[in-house]
Amino acid sequence: MWGVVKYEERGDSKHNEATCVRDTKGDVGSWGFPPASFIAGSEVLKGELLEGYALMDLTGPGGPGLLPGVGEMISTHSARVTAVQDKGFSK
């Protein structure tokens, strides 16, 4: 997944959210987007491919904290990046 993190408010909830697009693994270990992911004739990804993930609750007791499952997603991504770097590929 590739994404951008932004601050979001919905009612009484305040959180950081990642807006992501699922990428695919190429034949030489790199990651990217299939040509069909883009609006024709542009480098803009199609809106229906965007997925939003709330990452951090900013309003909970005890201050900001990661929402359930986010730590596991971060660990999985870090392991993938390390594996790619160990094979000599860039992120």
Image (tube, rainbow, N blue to C red):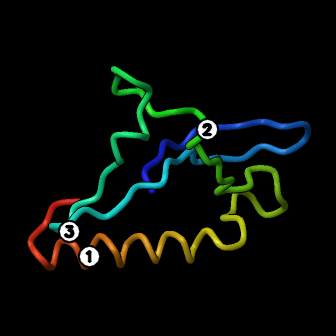
Which mark, residue 82? 1
Q: Earlier in the sequence, mark 2 or mark 1?
A: 2
| Residue at the disc numbered 3 | 29
Quadrant the C terminus occupies = bottom left
Label 1: which secondary element? helix
Outermost residue to the left: 88
> In the image, is 38 to the left or to the right of 11?
left
Q: Residue at x 49, y 69 (%)?
A: 74
Q: Residue at x 48, y 54 (%)?
A: 22
Q: Earlier in the sequence, mark 3 or mark 2?
A: 3
Mark 2 or 1, which is nearer the eye?
2
Tell me how far mark 2 sits from mark 1, CA to CA. 30 Å
Q: Are marks 1 and 3 in contact (CB under 8 Å)?
A: no
The amino acid sitting under disc 2 is Glu
Outermost residue to the top: 41
Mark 1 or 3, which is nearer the eye?
3
> Looking at this view, is 31 or 27 the one in front?
27
Quadrant the N terminus occupies = bottom left
Image x and y of residue 23, in percent: 40, 55
Q: Earlier in the sequence, mark 1 or mark 3?
A: 3
Label 3: which secondary element? loop
| Residue at the disc numbered 2 | 48
Tell me how far mark 3 sits from mark 2, CA to CA. 26 Å
The amino acid sitting under disc 1 is Thr
